């Protein structure tokens, strides 16, 4: 293959592979939550960027999530890096249930069931867990 074709073809293949990976990860968890809690209005102004969450089985979002803890609920948005297939979410507080703390030698994670009946389970960092707990107990505005 001539070099004039090789470089653009390689870049196109990498772009397609990235796009497919984003869609596959989204379909494994994020899209199931988005069916019920997709958010299309203006995003909240107070976003905490570069947060990490896990949505099993494939969604390990390290440093790619912006989160807002607001009166209506928990707002989640992905960075542009993994945008395909990931619509913003606004999950009402009534649909978020704390399950348990997971401390198995790694950084402590906190699992929450989303939806009733459960749509998916999300694992949050301790920082986000504390913010959620403050909001759900009425200690934050």
Image: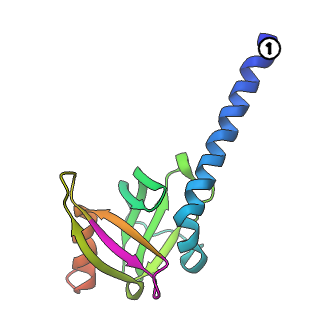
* Residue tagged 1: 4
Q: Which residue does the image show at 36% across and 55% down from the upper left?
A: 52
State which quarter of the image contains the C terminus.
Answer: bottom left
Q: Position of residue 104 (x, y in %)?
A: 20, 57
Q: Which residue does the image show at 54% across and 70% down from the upper left?
A: 42
The answer to which of 121 and 5 lies nearer the viewer is 121
Q: Quadrant of residue 7?
A: top right
Q: Is residue 59 above or below residue 8?
A: below
Is residue 79 rendered to the left or right of residue 135? right
Q: Quadrant of residue 113?
A: bottom left
Mark 1 element type: helix
Q: Is residue 114 magenta?
A: yes
Report the colour scheme.
Answer: rainbow
Q: Position of residue 122 (x, y in %)?
A: 39, 68
Q: Which residue does the image show at 22% across and 86% down from the upper left?
A: 137
Q: Is residue 38 magenta?
A: no
Q: Position of residue 107 (x, y in %)?
A: 21, 53
Q: Which residue does the image show at 34% across and 74% down from the upper left?
A: 112
User: Can see residue 114?
Assistant: yes
Is residue 16 rendered to the left or right of residue 110? right
Q: Residues within 10 Å of mark 1 (few under 14, many from 20)?
A: few
Is residue 57 rendered to the left or right of residue 9? left
The answer to which of 41 and 15 lies nearer the viewer is 15
Count of numbered badges drawn on the protein: 1
Q: Position of residue 123 (x, y in %)?
A: 34, 65
State which quarter of the image contains the N terminus.
Answer: top right
User: Can see residue 141?
Assistant: no
Is residue 109 rendered to the left or right of residue 9? left
Q: Please give the range of residues in magenta.
A: 110-119
Q: Quadrant of residue 56?
A: bottom left
Q: Is residue 73 above or below residue 129?
A: below
């Amino acid at each position: 293959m001539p070099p004039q074709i090789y470089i653009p073809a390689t870049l196109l293949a990498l772009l397609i592979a990235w796009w497919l990976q984003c869609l596959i990860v989204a379909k494994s968890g994020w899209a199931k939550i988005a069916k019920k809690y997709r958010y299309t209005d203006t995003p909240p102004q107070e976003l905490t960027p570069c947060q990490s969450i896990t949505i099993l089985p494939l969604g390990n979002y390290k440093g790619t999530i912006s989160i807002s803890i607001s009166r209506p609920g928990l707002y989640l948005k992905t960075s542009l890096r993994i945008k395909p297939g990931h619509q913003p979410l606004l999950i009402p507080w009534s649909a978020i249930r704390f399950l348990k703390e997971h401390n198995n030698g790694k950084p402590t994670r906190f699992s929450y069931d989303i939806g009733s009946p459960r749509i998916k389970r999300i694992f949050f960092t301790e920082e986000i867990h504390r913010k959620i707990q403050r909001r759900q107990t009425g200690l934050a505005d």
